[in-house]
């Protein structure tokens, strides 16, 4: 079924994805509606994808279509335009020509040699090789018969003439002289006839030789003509080979030309592709830089907001902690905090009442035990009069001792207690002090921010009230009410120079 551009527009519009097509995609779809419908299908796959890998595959398939139909790509989401130029199309064209180049062929037929004198040469050669040996007989020589008749006739005539002449000389009577003369005349011609035999033999032999030579000449003439024909064949064959070699070199030249064009186009395509990748990387860098700027701005804004909120929170916490410390101090001193102070502390009235009741129980227990003002975190008390030789003496220390103890109990830079702390106050050994601090926490105690805020509030309270006992009582009260742990209480008591053993029951 042949699709139209209107079919594509209708399908893209009904899908709601028409606005995601670049102008180049639309122009290409106008030429090739099936391209537009295929891209539309891949865009749907892209939107329906549930993983990054599925979206990547859909986008790569769409870019392959763009490359095939229009020698361009659409980038990471199809909205961009990266021209691939004419090079890929030209490469495809050259590759098609190379694939269709075919094998070498030459239309002309090679000349074939046909010896038309072969039979004559064979016949003449057979005649020469099979020629009979020379033989001669005067009886078979026709010239001999002719010579014999002629010489015999002349002999007879000579004999007759001699006899007649001799008879005439003798008066007409044959005489012995006449007969002898006639006989001599006949013998002369007979001798002459015999003398002809060698000549006739020689003539016959010469004729034999002449015939042989003529046969050789005939064979030579035939061979010469055959050689002329063969030389002509060789010329034709040489021209054929020359023409064929020229055609083959032309074939190779055309093929090498295509290979050279392909190599040049591939080289240029590599350069163009490198530029294409550079542009993509540049765009990605710009996008990343823009993203980083936006993220950094958001992060700075977040940090500003967070810091502002944290400062506001800390200010509120500091005010609240100060109010809580003041309430603890007032309750420890036996007073009653105002409703305004309770509201600023965040404590509920019930909690303040419970805390006030705890201080009353502590005070009543101290009275029963002989006036000791210290209580343990578990509700039991230890007499502050049981001072140790190590310098812990009812929490009453000089300012210098307190500073030395605080210095000895400082938290290291990494937030943990250093094992090499020196017990400058009271002579307590470093190992013993460390053992005390590690008894409950396993040696890794680190004060929380809430504990540090509590210490800050107690510092303010000490500066305002000047009461050391109130600080110790406040720490114990915080432990009894569960606001701080035993480790926290031990840390805070040590921080302010108290011996935790005077206030915490470790049994």
Image (spheres, rainbow, N blue to C red):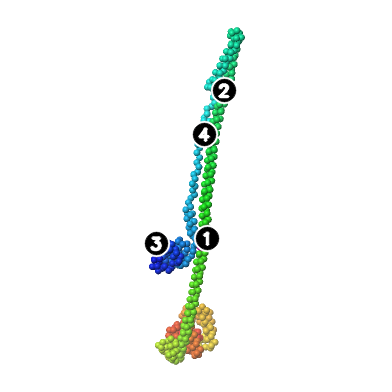
Label number found at residue 3: 3
Numbered disc 3: secondary structure: loop
Mark pair 1, 2: CA separation: 100 Å
Task: Please tell me whether residue 266 belongs to the stretch shown in magenta.
Answer: yes
Q: Which residue is mark 2?
A: 200
Point out the frontmost of discs 3 and 1: 3
Point out the frontmost of discs 2 and 3: 3
**Mark 2 vs mark 4: which is more N-terminal?**
4
Task: Please tell me whether residue 144 belongs to the stretch shown in magenta.
Answer: no
Tell me the crowding category of disc 4: few under 14, some 14 to 19, or many 20 or more residues within 10 angstroms, Cα based. some
Q: Disc 2, disc 3: CB below 8 Å?
A: no
Q: Which residue is mark 4?
A: 121
Report if residue 381 is visible in the image: no
User: Which range is magenta?
Assistant: 265-274
**Mark 2 vs mark 3: which is more N-terminal?**
3
Q: Which residue is mark 1?
A: 268
Numbered disc 2: secondary structure: helix
Numbered disc 4: secondary structure: helix
Numbered disc 1: secondary structure: helix
Report if residue 414 is visible in the image: yes
């Amino acid at each position: 079924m042949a699709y139209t551009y209107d079919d594509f527009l209708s399908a893209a519009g009904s899908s709601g994805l028409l606005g995601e097509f670049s102008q180049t995609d639309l122009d290409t779809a106008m030429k090739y509606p099936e391209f537009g419908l295929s891209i539309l299908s891949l865009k749907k796959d892209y939107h329906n994808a549930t993983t990054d890998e599925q979206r990547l595959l859909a986008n790569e398939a769409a870019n392959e279509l763009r490359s095939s139909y229009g020698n361009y790509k659409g980038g990471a989401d199809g909205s961009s335009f990266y021209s691939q130029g004419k090079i890929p199309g030209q490469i495809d064209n050259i590759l098609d020509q190379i694939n269709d180049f075919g094998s070498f062929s030459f239309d002309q037929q090679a000349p074939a040699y046909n010896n038309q004198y072969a039979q004559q040469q064979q016949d003449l050669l057979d005649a020469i090789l099979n020629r009979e040996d020379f033989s001669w007989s005067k009886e078979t020589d026709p010239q001999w018969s002719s010579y014999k008749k002629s010489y015999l006739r002349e002999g007879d005539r000579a004999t007759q003439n001699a006899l007649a002449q001799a008879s005439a000389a003798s008066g007409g009577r044959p005489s012995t002289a006449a007969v002898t003369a006639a006989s001599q005349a006949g013998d002369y011609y007979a001798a002459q006839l015999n003398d002809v035999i060698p000549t006739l033999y020689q003539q016959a032999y010469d004729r034999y030789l002449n015939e042989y030579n003529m046969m050789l000449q005939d064979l030579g003439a035939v061979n010469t003509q055959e050689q002329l024909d063969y030389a002509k064949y060789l010329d034709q064959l040489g021209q054929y080979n020359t023409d064929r070699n020229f055609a083959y070199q032309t074939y190779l030249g055309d093929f090498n030309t295509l290979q050279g064009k392909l190599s040049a186009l591939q080289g240029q395509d590599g350069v163009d592709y490198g530029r294409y990748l550079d542009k993509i990387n540049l765009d990605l860098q710009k996008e990343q830089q823009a993203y980083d700027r936006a993220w950094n701005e958001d992060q700075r804004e977040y940090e500003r907001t967070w810091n502002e909120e944290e400062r506001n929170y800390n200010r509120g916490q500091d005010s609240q902690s100060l109010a809580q410390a003041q309430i603890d101090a007032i309750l420890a001193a036996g007073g009653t905090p105002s409703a305004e102070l309770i509201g600023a502390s965040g404590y509920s009235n019930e909690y303040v009442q419970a805390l006030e009741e705890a201080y009353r129980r502590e005070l009543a227990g101290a009275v029963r035990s002989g006036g000791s003002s210290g209580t343990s975190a578990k509700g039991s008390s230890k007499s502050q009069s049981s001072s140790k030789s190590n310098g812990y003496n009812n929490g009453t220390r000089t300012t210098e001792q307190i500073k030395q103890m605080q210095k000895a109990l400082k938290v290291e830079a990494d937030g943990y207690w250093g094992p090499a702390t020196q017990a400058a106050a009271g002579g307590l050994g470093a190992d013993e002090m460390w053992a005390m601090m590690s008894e409950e926490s396993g040696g890794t105690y680190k004060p929380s921010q809430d504990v540090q805020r509590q210490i800050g509030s107690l510092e303010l309270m000490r500066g305002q009230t000047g009461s050391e006992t109130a600080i110790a009582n406040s720490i114990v009260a915080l432990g009894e009410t569960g606001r701080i742990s035993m480790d926290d209480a031990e840390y805070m008591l040590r921080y302010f120079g108290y011996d935790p053993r005077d206030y915490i029951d470790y049994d």
